[in-house]
Image (cartoon, helix red, strand yellow):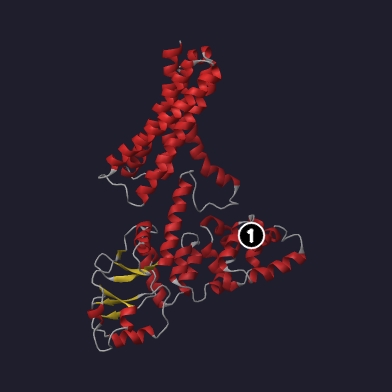
Amino acid sequence: MSEHLSGLINDALHLSKDEETSSELKVKLSQTDTNDTALLLESVPIDERVLLWEALANHKKVDVLVAMRDDARIALIEATELEEWEALFIDVEAEVVLELVDSLPKEVLSIAYSAMDRLQKLYFSSAIEYAAQEVGHWINHNFLVLPLNAKVRDGVRLLRRDLPAHTDAIYLINRAGGFSYAVPITKIFSSPEHIHLVDIALEDYPTIHANEACHVAAKQVLLSNYSALPVVSADNKLLGRIDSKTASELAFEYYERQLMAGAGMDEDEDLFSPVRKSAKGRAVWLGINLLTAFLASAFIGVFEATLQQVVALAVLMPIVASMGGIAGSQTLTLIIRGLALKQVTSGNAMALLIKELKVGGLNGIIWALVIGVIAALWFNMPLIGVVIACAILLNIIAAALAGVCIPIILDKLNIDPALSGSVILTTVTDIVGFVAFLGLGTWLLL
């Protein structure tokens, strides 16, 4: 975070207490770009956030809302009177309203729709036919298009107008509006004006289907070596495009969602959301974790007599669980990333499992020997070293097996492995580690 933004946050926290600071802050807000302003509003408690919102110029407010997270913008939307929205939505575009559609009350959404011109309304109606997880919901309609019979001179004439950002090709469509070819701009400027654009077009130009998942489409754009790719409907009608900027945003949002889901949280959660709401959202996963902890404790209880007689086992138990948990989480993270990137398939899953078992076996042997020697010297009991070494080896191998199988199985069941994989993995490694350690301890030490 920049020093400028840090200073604004500190000033904002005193906004309602100091008149002079308030005036200075309003001036600074007018000079702060949209993204920094959004980050500032998300970084302060709700009361100060509303005061800052009221101090913003009207022409910045909608753009700032778009740049904010869903939960964080709710308080600002609720604090804005219904009659104020008409001034805020003047000449609003469909893409902006689509960003806010899940946050706006029906009355405000109606005002936004009325403020759009006929073409923007058409774009909006087309986009909402697709779910927010489908790329058709987020297409950009600002692109260059010509009919199939157009010539190079037509392309040059079109390029002399305002060139949309992230444009490196003109799209050619047939009479039915279907996508046919793409012509690179560089070829247009280096070709005679009288020839047809079809003659210099790229035949195998990649396209994206509107029903494609956003993160898959984003990856396709970012790996395509093009600034944008056309988006087509099921009947190949050209709907728009996804440029590299939008693709980067979609990819970032997807991976942030995966990261937050791993902790049982929503990526849109407000930093200063109400205590009850935050507690409710996290309580579910705390409860699930508690159930798994009780399950692990139940297995430990089976060996209560062993623990009473060999106290050293109780001292060393956390090491067994920790080593298995870390080893499993490393494998789990690798597989979840592979699933997200479509690198893990039924064809290579077995090879990947064998590789991870080998890695687990090698690490298991190395660390089993290290920990076994330390434990034997610590308690002056060679058999303690043997017990924990064997348990560590078994648990790390089990962790590798679980780290590969759990996310693949969850993915087959259409359950997000980032959301629940770590909870299941922890349970598996805890139970395997404790049973192996305490079972071997009972067998060898008693």
| Rendered image quadrant of residue 349 | top left
- Give the structural element (helix, strand or loop) at label 1: helix
| Rendered image quadrant of residue 213 | bottom left
Q: Nearer the viewer, residue 323 or 265?
A: 323
Image quarter (top left, top right, bottom left or bottom right) of the N terminus: bottom right
Q: Nearer the viewer, residue 283 or 216?
A: 216
Crowd band around label 1 with a 10 angstrom C-alpha radius: few (<14), some (14–19), many (20+): many
Is residue 282 left or right of 351 when viewed as pictured? right
Work out whether residue 196 can be spotted.
yes
Q: Is residue 427 above or below residue 58?
A: above
Image quarter (top left, top right, bottom left or bottom right) of the C terminus: top left
**View extreme (top): residue:** 446
Q: Is residue 184 above or below residue 25?
A: below
> How many marks are shown on the rendered structure?
1
**Picture coordinates of residue 3, whole percent (x, y):** 65, 61
Work out whether residue 128 can be spotted.
no
**Which residue type carries mark 1?**
Arg
Residue at the image position 27 percent from the left and 87 percent from the top: 192
Q: Nearer the viewer, residue 2 or 445?
A: 445
**Picture coordinates of residue 361, whole percent (x, y):** 37, 32
Is residue 269 left or right of 200 when viewed as pictured? right
Residue at the image position 49 percent from the left and 76 percent from the top: 91
Instruction: Please give the residue where the numbered disc 1 appears in the rendered image.
Output: 49
Residue at the image position 52 percent from the left and 58 percent from the top: 69
Q: Nearer the viewer, residue 387 or 51?
A: 387
**Picture coordinates of residue 301, whole percent (x, y):** 47, 19
